[in-house]
Image: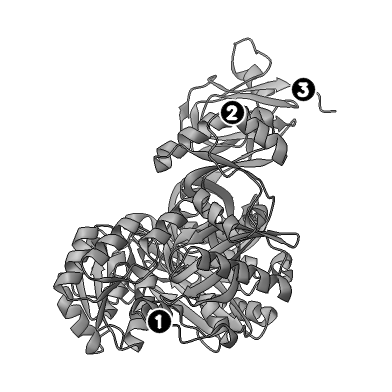
Amino acid sequence: MSRRIVAKCFNEEYSFTIEKHEENRFLISDEVLGKIDAEVKYLDELRAEVVIDGKKYVVVIDEDKNIAYVNGVPTKIKVLEFLETKAVNYETTSSSQKNNNREEVPGEIRAPLSGKIVSVKVSVGERVSKGETLLIMESMKMLNEIKSPYDGEVKGIFVKNGVSVKKNQLLLKIEPKNTS
Amino acid sequence: MPFDKILIANRGEIAVRIIRAARELGIKTVAIYTKDDVTALHVILSDEAYRISSYINMDEIIDVALKTKADAIHPGYGFLAENPVFASKVVKEGIVFIGPEPEAMVLAGNKLESKKSAIKADVPVIPGTLKTISNVKEAEKIAEELGYPVLLKAVGGGGGIGMRIVRNREELQKYFRLAQQEAYEAFAIPDIYIEKYIDKPRHIEVQILADNYGNVIHLFERECSIQRRFQKLLEEAPSKALMWDERLEIANDAIRLAEKIGYTNAGTVEFLYKNGKHYFIEINARLQVEHGVTEMVTGVDIVKAQIRIAADKPLNLGQGQISIKGWAIEVRINAEDPLRNFAPSPGKIIKYHEPGGFGVRVDSGVYEGYTIPQAFNPLISKLIVWGENRGEAIERLRRALTEYIVEGVRTTIPLYKKIVEDKDFIEGNIHTKYLDEKLPRFISELGIEERKRIIAASLAFKMRKTKVKKRFSQIRYEEYKIPRNLNVWKLSTLYNNNVY
């Protein structure tokens, strides 16, 4: 069982997953740092010692201001999502065919379920390859990765982080392209 | 004792720096402060302090000087330091202005006139026009002669404001009008002139001291090539780029210019340097932020020299007595977040420890418990190190940076820790675009630490089991408290009783 954490820090979003090993010990998966160990020890209600990858971080929390002083560095932080995840991946080609009656338009990526957009992973003009995660959405307390059905170029993004979407709502436009 | 009392028309570390020089000379100090600065260090350390509405309110400042019977006013840098109107007003009231004559400030403020003076003094300048260019046709002709790229410069500009690089004819046609308009909006003078653009030069400047009796000496050069958006971040003295003959040539050029224009007090002549050639760019008619590195290698206290010169004393040093000993490097500790485009990071300093030991100097305007106001420039202190040679100075800087603790606000310290490890910096391969080129790498390296901090903070926020009963304010770091609403007269008393 792993959980996904999305934290907003100075208006930028950071997301990573944590998996509990044993009491207070976790395995973190982060897209930049990779897999790292973390241990949390509480000193009191507002102070914790977090050891990440062998290095100690003393965190002092000022909850009123959403600021944590991490080794004294003021870190404006708001933890947005804290969800249990099961690895459910919707490949839009198959799911949309199964789940709706609408004629599928090539290049359009639509929401397989209603839910909330957690994180858009691509930007307009970006080249994507088949199977690449385009965005992450949350439906019924589960995180779903929407993956690209083909190689192509992102032509349009119609949602942003935090918005709610209905089933079949247009999310992205991707022009299929052969990678050569 | 040249004066009995001087007023310091400034704040922060530079006001503290001037208080220290004055106190050593046995001169009493009057500080001024605004509503945001009631607890500022310069207010605590001065002998008297008066509240004013703003640091640029000339009449109020002069009024305080008159009422406290101050003999002189030191403007520091920034605010009113290079304002000839202020300097004239001060003198008119019979108060001495510690700085150059207003005429020198007017000249220094006009880039084109400064350049003409440099040519008259036989000081090399950047190839370009000596008159303002009003139409595109003329501009094109000149640009062809100089060869692209060229720089469009506003006559009233300076400090990197009002400049535009133009790389070809199309760009010139596109930007000429715009540059005029920008110049008008920024300086109320639309005049533009054109210079050859020098790519990746070094910034080298010469410190000069000139008394009222025609004696002018130089204190050698500083190199300030490490800049971001024309703001200097790291300065050193001397410059690694110069051979001895070049060093003397540049220094003597600066002296000739100062003599030609009859400059008095402390000043800086700035040059660009590339491939063994130097070009005059501007005169800074003030004490500069980075004056400390020169003090460290020459042993001359520049602020004391300024005060003596202003008191009409002849220079007590001859050029022959000035030499360079060792190497000094300064880093400007700004309350800015290098990871977020250097966004200001005001707030309370909850923990503060300055580095020390042999060869380490910190000129600071803050203390533990002090809240950095949002209203002013983000410079909180200058860490200056001295070493026998450049290598030792870098090692000492590296050591001092690891000792420097500033908690509660974000600072540029982590960035400097990256610079002192950088091979090009260590080897002295620096130029004015050095930081632009290196920043992406430094930032991505700093970003890794940031991610770990965010993970640590997120875990701490979310994994705790107990509900919060305590509030942050109850367990806040040990606070250094200045009692609220305490009038400033008592602040000095507080200091003298060693409560601080």
Chain that bears disc 1: B
Upstream in sequence: badge 2 or badge 1: 2
Considering the numbered disc 2 on the image, is that residue within a helix, a strand or a loop?
helix
Tell me residue B317's x, y (percent). Answer: 50, 86
Instruction: Please tell me which residue lies in front, A146 or B290.
Output: B290
User: In the rendered structure, are the residues bearing label 2 and label 1 in contact, judged by CB atoms less than 8 Å apart?
Assistant: no
Tell me residue B219's x, y (percent). Answer: 56, 77
**Residue type at the position of mark 3:** Lys
Considering the numbered disc 1 on the image, is that residue within a helix, a strand or a loop?
helix
Chain that bears disc 2: B
Chain that bears disc 3: A
User: In the image, is B90 to the left or to the right of A140?
Assistant: left
Residue B399, by quadrant, is bottom right
Distance, label 3 to label 1, CA atoms, is 71 Å
Kindly identify which numbered label has been placed on residue A60: none
Kindly identify which numbered label has been placed on residue B136: 2
Distance, label 3 to label 2, CA atoms, is 46 Å
**Residue type at the position of mark 1:** Lys
Residue B157 visible here: yes
Of the residues tagged 3 and 1, which is closer to the observer? 1
The residue that disc 3 covers is A177
